[in-house]
Image: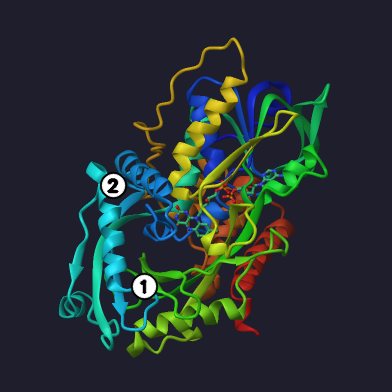
Amino acid sequence: MKRDIEQLKKKHFDILVIGGGINGCAIARDAALRGAKTALIEKDDFASGASGNTTKLIHGGIRYLEQGNFKLVYEALHERAILLRTVPHLVRPLEFIIPVYKHDPRGLLKIKTGAFIYDRLAGSDNIHCHRALKKDEVISLERNIDSDNLKGAILYYDAQVDDIRLCLDNAVSAYKAGCCVANKLQAKAFIKDKGRISGVEVRDKLTPEKFFIRASIVVNATGAWSNQVIKMDKPNAAPITRPTKGVHIVYRKLPHLRAIILSAHKDKRILFIIPWRDSTIIATTDTDYNGSLDEAYASEDDVEYLLKEARRIFPGENIDKKGIITTYTGLRPLVNIQGKPTWQVSREHLIKKSNAGLISVVGGKYTTYRHLAEEVVDVALSKLKGRNFKKCITKTTGPSCLREEKLDLPQLVKQAVKEEMANTLNDLLVRRLKLPFKFLFDPGHLEEYASIMANLLGWAKSQKEAEINMYKEEVRKNTAWRQS
Ligand SMILES: Cc1cc2nc3c(=O)[nH]c(=O)nc-3n(C[C@H](O)[C@H](O)[C@H](O)COP(=O)(O)OP(=O)(O)OC[C@H]3O[C@@H](n4cnc5c(N)ncnc54)[C@H](O)[C@@H]3O)c2cc1C
């Protein structure tokens, strides 16, 4: 995947997508596959925003039934089936257990009813039907969870995703379909022609040159940053998104085989304890966020809140801060609906068109990204009058970019740099190789990775050192709550 700045400067595009999260990458891919001349720009890296910091679930969202949001659950369950079919190497079924205790805010009958409706909504796209478990069955399946006051449980099925890889694969697949793709390019201002947006002024963070990209339609898919971009169009525009912070703890592997769902005793929210590779993810918080969008990290309170609830489920495990490997944090780009607790704001998406022609999309869930992209591209192409485009094929064709896995270290780094546009050490370690925490324990190897990258990208010694320091800083910020 070549970062072709000259093409971006020279061409006139049908559609320019701003934002390389899952939504932006999928919109760019769908538009390019339908034959539109498309460009995709990302200010940092693909999946560096919410899309690389999710709970990694492809799910209908059983909890949204409580809010009566059947439409969203129905859509998500059917999108789940499409992803299981089209990207089976990245989206896999996962067994869930919902244990119910005497003092839980949601009783067994309510959970059973929810699971029944969930199965009905999934219909023939279901993975398997749920099963109600008696207390002794729960204990025989998950022998380490608390059995005191346990009334029973529900066993049901959803799916787990490699969120970063699926986002990257959408970017690579967009590129292969003819889209001009570049990370480290930040949209700074709109160019307007008789009041209509006709392009974007961008800053190249690698050089740092400024230049213009011309396009008939501009799509704002910048997630939590959407308010900033709509203000570039209309400085007094009302905010369309309400960013909320979601913190995850990556904990040493706890003794459980299935994902566990619990109702937080503090505030009744739904929390997840999920097996992930050699660790357990404890997720997540959901609090309004007003800080810098580029600097969202876990606080000590966030960590304590999650640990406290996990301790309840695994009383024999001495769960404390020492078992935490790291934390990671994402900002949910929820539609700006005030007056409700964050966790009750709908996860449905909103597509908004401005008078100047900007198409903005916010909200949604990772699970429903494909459908969201299809809708946005339908809207965008309808503006390109007199042109014929191909039909959307993403329901049946996934962004399958199968990679050679058995590579030695220099080959792996080369693949990340040449084929997946890794431009910084963080791009490589945090997202392409998914080793964000490795060098906490293995600092010696950091130098080796940095040297291979420096050779490939022609970094001077000072730049290599700066890259190593930026990586260490990222690790430090994700564990800064340890110091407080
Ligand atoms: C904590 C958390 C857990 C979640 N868990 C799940 C889950 O398990 N399952 C699920 O279905 N959904 C989940 N979600 C929801 C899901 O992650 C989001 O709906 C989805 O990732 C949003 O994608 P996006 O592309 O809109 O935003 P992002 O992924 O945030 O992408 C926006 C991108 O725009 C870029 N950008 C911003 N400004 C500019 C600019 N001026 N120029 C160029 N680029 C710019 C940013 O750098 C960023 O990369 C979760 C969300 C969070 C935060």
Where residue 334 sits: x, y (%)?
59, 53
Circle 1 is placed at which residue position?
A: 106
Looking at this view, is 10 or 190 the one in front? 190
Is the residue at mark 1 in contact range of ligand 1, meaning its CB lies under 8 Å from it? no
Q: Residue at x 55, y 57 (%)?
A: 345
The quadrant in which the C terminus is found is bottom right
Does the image show residue 94?
no
Looking at this view, is 176 or 341 the one in front? 341
Q: Residue at x 60, y 69 (%)?
A: 475
Tell me where residue 37 sits by quadrant: top right
Q: 10 Å neighbourhood of mark 1: few (<14), some, or many (≥20)? A: some
* Position of 467 relative to 412 (above/below): below
* Position of 191 relative to 412 (above/below): above
Q: How many marks?
A: 2
Q: Residue at x 54, y 44 (%)?
A: 349
Disc 1 marks which amino acid? Arg
Disc 2 marks which amino acid? Ala
Q: Earlier in the sequence, mark 2 or mark 1?
A: 1
- The disc at residue 122 is 2
Where residue 113 sits: x, y (%)?
28, 62
Does the image show residue 398?
yes
